[in-house]
């Protein structure tokens, strides 16, 4: 194990692994990944792998479309079947004001070439007949090209490719500090080893604000817990990935493996690293999704778990080099969209690191320095909650 | 399986299984009635469509899951027969007996758990079609779309100084110890009302005495038919009672949840005809069903005497009883076991014809404790995973104690009683009760008695083809293949092979998997719920 590297990536999740692969493809020299647990142990292993192009804002939809294309090409690029399944995505609407709100969003999608459809209740029922017995819907928005991916397979695909390309991956190695001189990175302290390097990437997901603090940068990311329940696998009965926002945000879908995964968000969820499950979540989720689709009542819950969103105040990630410490790059703050955004974003960041020029496709909104100097930041307002508010 | 003559049975009932009429008796479970009616197979396993019948007697191994009146994944070993039921096998077509997909079993060695990641990519326009095809092969059991009658429960928050889970000898013993000193205690169990336990065949006098005491103790609150779903943060338990969804806040918690039947690792360890000794006992004594004609008995715990006499009483011929230094190399059969190959003490192997193999092996239940990160350790004496405990039986989670069979204290009534009293008194002392130190000191001495010399569970199987995980059909060799591929961490092995992720959530496979990948590597965290729960039981009003 060499104790110097051209680039050190903190965090061996989907962001860190895909960045390492993209860097190696651009001949970036010796790349080291430091992972405090096992690869993918944070949010990369604890998410439900929804890959959707239809977003609520224009900027995000434009970018998400490119991110989805990245998934389309992933199997060819990596020689690995990540099971990207275009199952279809369906937003269920339960109030008439939701339809009014969705109409311009669907128009925006069409402008950008995302073929979403605003559906009448009978169309929703034709698409997903099991909803007939449930709470009456006022409509829905569907996009058949959106879907889900086997998130673990994406991690493995990048992991195996990274190893093949010669990336040094140190699992169970925690970063405890940095060597900073004159506002420039000179090394990373990984337990007893000091790895000298002039380029560090903070891709630590829910732990990224802690890592940033080690170099003296305050970023406003805060980890927020999201819980999920999983049922015993059953034969295919539900195709679409379903999301609803009323009365509170919730979602469910059947995976390729046959399990139904579901969750209803707790609007009062407090921030902090916490991956414990709760009994109230089981009751809240079961009660609400059974109301929407009574056929789910018969499924058996076999497991519940919690994952972490690394949420920024404006729900946009931080990607790029920090102004405060040269050589220190951010690749975090995914705000619950890491699976969708990171493979493509890391391709752009790799270009930026290797050429020194920010690619045109990188949205300005992802500027990692946009919060610098702002002392009091508004409480992280949930993107969906803002939408759901009447 | 066949019915034992001269057994007093319930009323005659009729139901259908895979469209064929089955004649049965009311006291029988669906599984025994079907298997006693010349059906060999109840269901098919998830990946390789291997024949499944029954193994355990608790409804948790998942081998006997069937569809009853359109409701899928019902354990046929627990559901009683009733007139007019429509029972269907799962994951089989056209029937469990003649399942066309069992061809997959023949190519199973090329279907390791991640094979599809290198396949189904070209031609590119067929990718989504391939996924749709893969999807058809996943999952077990259908979902009916007609709505079910729904019962809604009241959500409640209840506080109690002491909560005991499990109504066995140890659980009742601990609860009685606490209540006798005047402290309020809630005793929770999934089973029926306590009075019914008195009718159990062969119930011990010590337990009878404790059950009688319960009635005299007003501080002891007994919740029957209540399922403890999980131990969550801040000493709260999630409990589903017949009419409530309770978040139970307890200062002191005692788990006396008992042990599960274990399946040792050997080639063919999932064949029909291999059943746990505890299930054999239940079938013979309660249902009047003999689980076979010629049996081999393997008591890993070394208690084969009582098992063999019970089997002989039921008219079953004992072909062989394994000695402590002997082990099973391979079980042979397809839809039915026909022989086992035994490694004798001198290393030679011997084949023996038989139609059933009774396995007497136990493993402690740890799932509730590990849900909040309670530490486990590998116990040499029982050759399994047990809770790490201090001298007062407290685990690494403060205020949580594990006692009795759940802590690896198998087949030892006296020791269980000592542990029950010690846990009860220690819990009281932690609550601030005085004057019980002498009692605790005295009990501490007793609780150090020696357990088993060594229980011999195999750590590998012939050619690595023994099954580790029965929910997801994972063989020992698949775990080793993943480790060779660089996936060493248990969490990664779990995700790569799907062990620990099926309906049993690793209860049956955790110890065997650890014996394969190394007992010092550690286990993965368990997640609630402790047992599968129907979503309809979680509905609040």
Image (spheres, coloured by chain):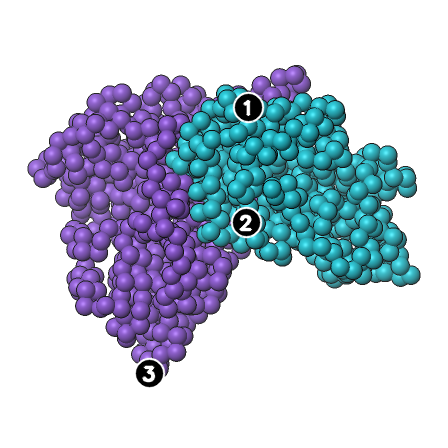
Chain colours: A cyan, B purple
> How much space separates mark 2 and mark 3, taking CA atoms?
46 Å
Residue at mark 3: chain:
B
Residue at mark 1: chain:
A
A74 horizontally vs B127: left or right: right
Are both tags, 3 and 1, on one chain?
Answer: no
Q: State the residue at coordinates (71%, 55%).
A: A378
Q: Mark 2 points at which residue?
A: A266
Q: Which of B278 and B515 lies nearest the eye of the viewer?
A: B278
Q: Is mark 2 on a helix, strand or loop?
A: loop
Crowd rating for badge 1 (residues with CA inside 10 Å; few <14, some 14–19, many 20+):
some
Question: x%, y% of residue A10?
Answer: 74, 51
Report the disc number at residue A120.
1
B171 horizontally vs A146: left or right: left
Q: Quadrant of residue B257?
A: bottom left
> How much space separates mark 1 and mark 2, taking CA atoms?
29 Å
Q: In which quarter of the image is residue B78?
A: top left
Report the disc number at residue B435.
3
As displayed, is residue B39 above or below residue B255? above
Q: State the residue at coordinates (28%, 75%).
A: B181
As displayed, is residue A222 above or below residue B26? below
Q: Nearer the viewer, mark 1 or mark 2?
A: 1
Question: x%, y% of residue B158?
Answer: 38, 61
Residue at mark 2: chain:
A
Q: Can residue A315 be seen in this view?
A: yes
């Amino acid at each position: 194990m060499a104790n110097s590297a051209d680039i050190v990536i903190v965090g061996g999740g989907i962001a860190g692994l895909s960045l390492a692969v993209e860097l190696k493809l651009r001949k970036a020299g010796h790349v080291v990944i430091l992972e405090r647990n096992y690869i993918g142990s944070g949010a990369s292993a604890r998410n439900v792998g929804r890959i959707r192009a239809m977003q609520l804002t224009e900027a995000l939809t434009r970018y998400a479309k490119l991110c989805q294309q990245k998934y389309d090409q992933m199997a060819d690029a990596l020689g690995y079947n990540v099971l990207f399944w275009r199952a279809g995505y369906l937003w269920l609407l339960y109030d008439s004001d939701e339809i009014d709100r969705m109409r311009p969003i669907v128009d925006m999608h069409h402008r950008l070439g995302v073929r979403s459809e605003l559906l009448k209740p009978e169309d929703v029922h034709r698409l997903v007949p099991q909803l007939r017995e449930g709470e009456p819907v006022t409509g829905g928005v569907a996009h058949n090209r959106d879907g889900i991916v086997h998130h673990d397979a994406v991690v493995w695909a990048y992991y195996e490719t990274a190893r093949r390309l010669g990336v040094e991956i140190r699992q169970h190695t925690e970063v405890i500090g940095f060597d900073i001189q004159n506002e420039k990175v000179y090394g990373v302290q990984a337990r007893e080893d000091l790895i000298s390097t002039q380029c560090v990437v903070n891709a630590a997901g829910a732990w990224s604000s802690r890592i940033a603090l080690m170099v003296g940068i305050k970023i406003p990311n805060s980890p927020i817990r999201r819980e999920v329940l999983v049922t015993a696998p059953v034969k295919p009965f539900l195709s679409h990935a379903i999301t609803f926002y009323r009365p509170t945000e919730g979602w469910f879908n059947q995976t390729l493996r046959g399990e139904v995964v579901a969750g209803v968000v707790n609007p009062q969820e407090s921030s902090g690293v916490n991956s414990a499950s709760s009994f109230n979540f089981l009751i809240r989720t079961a009660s609400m999704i059974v109301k929407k689709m009574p056929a789910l009542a018969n499924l058996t819950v076999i497991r519940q778990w919690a994952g972490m969103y690394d949420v920024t105040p404006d729900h946009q990630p931080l990607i790029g080099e920090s102004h405060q410490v040269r050589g220190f790059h951010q690749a975090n703050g995914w705000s619950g969209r890491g699976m969708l955004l990171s493979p493509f974003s890391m391709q752009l960041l790799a270009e930026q690191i290797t050429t020194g020029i920010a690619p045109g496709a990188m949205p300005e909104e992802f500027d990692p320095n946009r919060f610098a100097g702002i002392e009091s930041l508004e409480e992280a307002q949930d993107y969906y909650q803002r939408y759901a508010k009447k | 399986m066949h019915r034992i003559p001269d057994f007093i049975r319930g009323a005659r009932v009729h139901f259908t299984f895979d469209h064929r009429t089955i004649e049965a008796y009311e006291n029988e479970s669906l599984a025994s009635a079907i298997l006693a009616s010349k059906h060999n197979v109840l269901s098919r396993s998830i990946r390789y469509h291997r024949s499944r019948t029954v193994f355990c007697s608790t409804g948790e191994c998942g081998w006997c899951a069937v569809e009853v009146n359109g409701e899928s994944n019902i354990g046929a070993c627990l559901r009683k027969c009733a007139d007019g039921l429509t029972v269907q096998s799962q994951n089989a077509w056209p029937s469990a007996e003649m399942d066309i997909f069992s061809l997959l079993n023949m190519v199973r060695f090329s279907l390791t758990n991640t094979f599809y990641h290198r396949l189904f990519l070209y031609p590119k326009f067929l990718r989504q079609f391939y996924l749709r095809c893969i999807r058809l092969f996943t999952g077990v059991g259908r979902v009916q779309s007609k709505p079910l009658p729904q019962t809604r429960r009241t959500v409640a928050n209840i506080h109690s100084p002491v909560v005991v889970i499990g109504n066995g000898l140890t659980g009742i013993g601990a609860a009685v110890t606490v209540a006798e000193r005047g402290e309020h205690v809630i005793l929770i169990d999934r089973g029926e009302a306590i009075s019914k336990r008195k009718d159990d065949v062969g119930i011990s006098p010590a337990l009878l005495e404790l059950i009688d005491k319960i009635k005299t103790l007003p501080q002891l609150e007994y919740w029957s038919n209540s399922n403890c779903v999980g131990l969550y943060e801040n000493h709260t338990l999630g409990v589903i009672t017949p009419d409530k969804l309770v978040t139970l806040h307890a200062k002191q918690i005692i788990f006396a949840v008992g042990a599960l039947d274990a399946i040792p690792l050997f080639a063919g360890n999932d064949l029909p005809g291999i059943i746990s000794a505890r299930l054999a006992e239940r079938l013979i004594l309660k249902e009047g069903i003999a689980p076979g004609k010629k049996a081999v008995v393997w008591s890993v715990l070394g208690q084969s005497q009582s098992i063999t006499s019970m089997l002989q009483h039921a008219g079953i011929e004992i072909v062989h009883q394994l000695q402590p230094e002997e082990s099973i190399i391979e079980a042979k059969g397809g839809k039915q076991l026909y022989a086992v190959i035994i490694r004798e003490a001198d290393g030679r192997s011997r084949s023996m014809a038989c139609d059933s193999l009774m396995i007497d092996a136990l493993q402690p239940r740890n799932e509730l404790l590990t849900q909040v990160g309670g530490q486990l350790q590998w116990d040499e004496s029982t050759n399994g995973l047990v809770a790490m405990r201090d001298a007062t039986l407290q685990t690494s989670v403060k205020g949580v104690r594990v006692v009795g069979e759940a802590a690896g204290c198998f087949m030892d009534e006296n020791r269980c009683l000592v542990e029950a009293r010690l846990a009860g008194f220690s819990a009281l002392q932690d609550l601030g009760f005085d004057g019980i130190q002498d009692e605790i000191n005295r009990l501490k001495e007793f609780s150090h008695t020696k357990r088993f010399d060594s229980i011999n569970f195999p750590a590998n199987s012939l050619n690595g083809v023994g099954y580790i995980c029965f929910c997801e059909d994972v063989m020992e060799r698949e775990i080793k293949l993943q480790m060779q591929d660089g996936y060493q961490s248990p969490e990664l092995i779990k995700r790569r092979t799907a062990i620990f992720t099926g309906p049993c959530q690793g209860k049956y496979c955790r110890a065997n998997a650890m014996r394969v990948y190394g007992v010092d590597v550690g286990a993965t965290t368990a997640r609630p719920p402790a047992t599968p729960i129907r979503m309809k039981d979680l509905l609040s009003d």
